[in-house]
Image: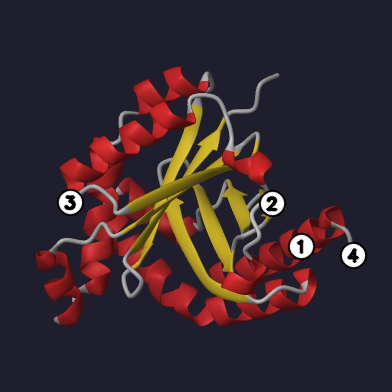
Amino acid sequence: MDNKSIEAEIASYTGKLFRDNFGKGPSSLFVSVVKPFITIHLRDFLAPMERVLVNQKNDLKVQETRDLLMQELLPDIKATIRTTAQVDIQNIYYDWSLTNKTGIIIAEMSEEEQNITEDYLSYPARDKVHEEIVRFSEKAQKAPSSLFSLMLNPRTLMIVRKGILVRIEKELIKAGFEEQLKLSKRRLEKSLLNIDLLESLLGVQIEDVFADWDFDLDKGYIALILKPEK
């Protein structure tokens, strides 16, 4: 099965899964298969009850409810991606933008599958982009011990940081406050990222910023959704 067929099948399955479990599915999904990631970008996704909560400024309650439901759905999503793409999936990450009614699911392939094509590691102003990522990481917690990024497609820039957790965060995770820490870090990091600078460096408009973490591996993932050039 070629990548286009894989992407179409994953999009169809994910759309139906979300409709069945949230009562409303996204109006469109954009799936990208580029080792070591399979990303699913959801657009116009906000259930009627969630819309009421967002209008009442209860975004946190929506995030918490989605997290609970996603824990039930992730095994199905992981199994479907594994079967469809014929790759082993190490872990799945996700984030939402309730304001934009969008979301992203990031499936990371296992280390055996991670033969990254050099072409995706090179894009204009990459070094300057990395400088901004290090700067805002230092403000939020500390500079990453390692950093790499991939331009998966004209719409998606994936940034992976390792070694960013500080001692107090590690203690909060040990104490069972992982969920609260993740929600707080999302708000903080998105507020510190210099979007204007990144848009200037990349030469495109940034439509969405998504973030998630693997606390066990001390890794952070940032996905920038770019507005395609006409």
Q: Residue furthest right?
A: 1
Looking at the image, which is closer to me, 49 or 210?
Answer: 210
Give the labeled residue for mark 3.
141
Please name the residue shown 27% across and 71% down the image.
Answer: 179
Q: Is residue 213 above or below residue 203?
A: below
The number of numbered badges drawn on the structure is 4
Which label was assigned to residue 32?
2
- Give the SS element for disc 2: strand
Q: Is residue 188 above or below residue 11?
A: above
Of the image marks 4 and 3, the number of the one nearer the N terminus? 4
- Give the SS element for disc 4: loop
Q: In the rendered image, is residue 9 in sight?
A: yes
The residues bearing labels 4 and 2 have C-alpha atoms spaced at a distance of 14 Å
User: Which mark lies nearer to you, 2 or 3?
Assistant: 3
Which label was assigned to residue 12?
1
Residue 46 image point, x, y percent: 50, 53
Please name the residue shown 68% across and 62% down the image.
Answer: 15
Q: Residues within 10 Å of mark 4 (few under 14, many from 20)?
A: few
Q: Is residue 225 above or below residue 206?
A: below
Type of the residue with mark 3:
Gln
Please name the residue shown 60% across and 50% down the image.
Answer: 41
Give the labeled residue for mark 4.
1
The residues bearing labels 1 and 2 have C-alpha atoms spaced at a distance of 13 Å
Of the image marks 4 and 2, the number of the one nearer the N terminus? 4
Of the image marks 1 and 3, the number of the one nearer the N terminus? 1
